[in-house]
């Protein structure tokens, strides 16, 4: 009887730490953010200067956030940034994975480590490193152009700012995505390649017509990771903000949320913005997965 009870309770004992971590670091914060988003601070009369009290305000914080033009302007800037960062990251990751999977490739371990190494650098450190290479006074690129008789390159001005920020994301994210795609390539049976070569398939045709279609699930996964990472961009523009006047305090949605909560001291409004961003990220991810599923399995449904 005791042994039977142990068998029944063993799975629950093993899963208990995961459940506790889920509740403590995900479920409870989400519920608290939802609760906070429908609250608001109101000034009550009754004393010389009045007193602030937290009250229920319903959807007022959501209406204020959705009607804020700067909040939506942050999404437009985020879209311009993502149109550069996501295709470049996935394209380079796929190219590097195909190159490493080539039968004639040498030094694969060293190459994998070299490509993956930037991902191990924390985002803030990477932003600082690239920031110093962007500043005209410390940039080696601007030094070369000035020595050639030209002007310093305005990396952090105008439309160049989007490319400079995207470059940091590409530099740090290619290695991680390459590893996922390369692992997917290595899982393809060698007999598939042998049969294609017997049929006269060249290495280029092998890569384009066989390898790429077979790693579409990995490409969808890395695309989803890149999309979510783009919607959550915060560290790079915040780190570069002191180096340029082009980046405002609410340049992207997360910076807008931070400014609402910790600069304007309006945590309920920041919570409402966080909930809107989280819901938007969820539905965009769901839409991407649905479209990918239809394209991959549409003929079988």
Image (spheres, rainbow, N blue to C red):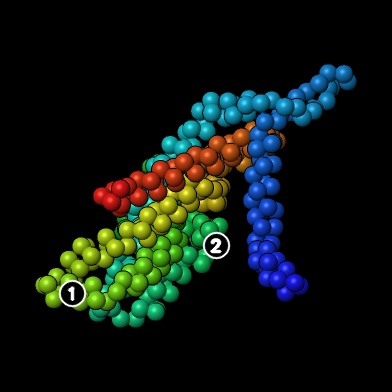
The reply to whether residue 245 is visible in this rendering is no
Pick whichever, 164 or 57, lies toward us: 57
Q: Give coordinates of residue 98: x percent, y percent.
A: 29, 68
- Residue 123 in the figure: left or right of residue 114: right
- Residue 152 in the figure: left or right of residue 233: left
Tally the marks: 2
Q: Give coordinates of residue 229: x percent, y percent.
A: 48, 51
Secondary structure of the residue carrying tag 2 is: loop
Crowd around label 1: few <14 · some 14–19 · many ≥20 (10 Å): few
Q: Give coordinates of residue 123: x percent, y percent.
A: 53, 58
Marks 1 and 2, how far apart in space? 44 Å
Crowd around label 2: few <14 · some 14–19 · many ≥20 (10 Å): few
- Residue 50 in the figure: left or right of residue 171: right
Q: Find disc 1 in the rendering and name its residue.
A: 195
The reply to whether residue 286 is visible in this rendering is yes
Pick whichever, 112 or 189, lies toward us: 189
Query: What is the number of the mark on residue 122?
Result: 2
Residue ID at (75%, 24%): 42
């Amino acid at each position: 009887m005791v042994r039977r009870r142990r068998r029944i309770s063993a799975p629950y004992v093993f899963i208990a730490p995961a459940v506790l971590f889920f509740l403590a670091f995900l479920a409870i914060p989400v519920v608290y953010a939802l609760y906070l988003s429908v609250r608001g601070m109101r000034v009550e009369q009754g004393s010389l200067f009045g007193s602030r009290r937290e009250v229920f305000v319903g959807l007022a914080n959501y209406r204020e956030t959705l009607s804020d033009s700067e909040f939506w302007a942050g999404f437009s800037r985020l879209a311009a940034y993502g149109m550069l960062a996501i295709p470049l990251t996935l394209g380079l990751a796929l190219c590097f994975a195909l190159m490493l999977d080539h039968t004639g490739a040498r030094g694969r371990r060293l190459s994998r480590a070299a490509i993956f190494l930037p991902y191990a650098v924390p985002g803030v450190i990477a932003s600082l490193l690239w920031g110093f290479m962007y500043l005209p006074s410390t940039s080696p690129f601007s030094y070369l152009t000035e020595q050639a008789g030209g002007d310093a390159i305005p990396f952090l001005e105008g439309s160049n700012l989007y490319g400079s920020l995207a470059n940091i994301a590409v530099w740090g994210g290619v290695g991680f995505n390459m590893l996922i795609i390369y692992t997917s390539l290595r899982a393809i049976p060698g007999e598939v390649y042998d049969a294609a070569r017997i049929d006269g398939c060249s290495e280029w045709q092998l890569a384009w017509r066989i390898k790429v279609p077979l790693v579409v699930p990995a490409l969808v996964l890395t695309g989803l990771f890149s999309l979510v990472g783009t919607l959550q961009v915060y560290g790079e523009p915040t780190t570069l903000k002191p180096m340029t006047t082009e980046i405002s305090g609410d340049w992207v949605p997360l910076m807008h949320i931070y400014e609402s909560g910790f600069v304007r001291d309006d945590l309920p409004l920041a919570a409402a913005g966080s909930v809107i961003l989280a819901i938007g990220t969820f539905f965009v991810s769901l839409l991407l997965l649905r479209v990918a599923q239809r394209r991959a399995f549409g003929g079988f449904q």
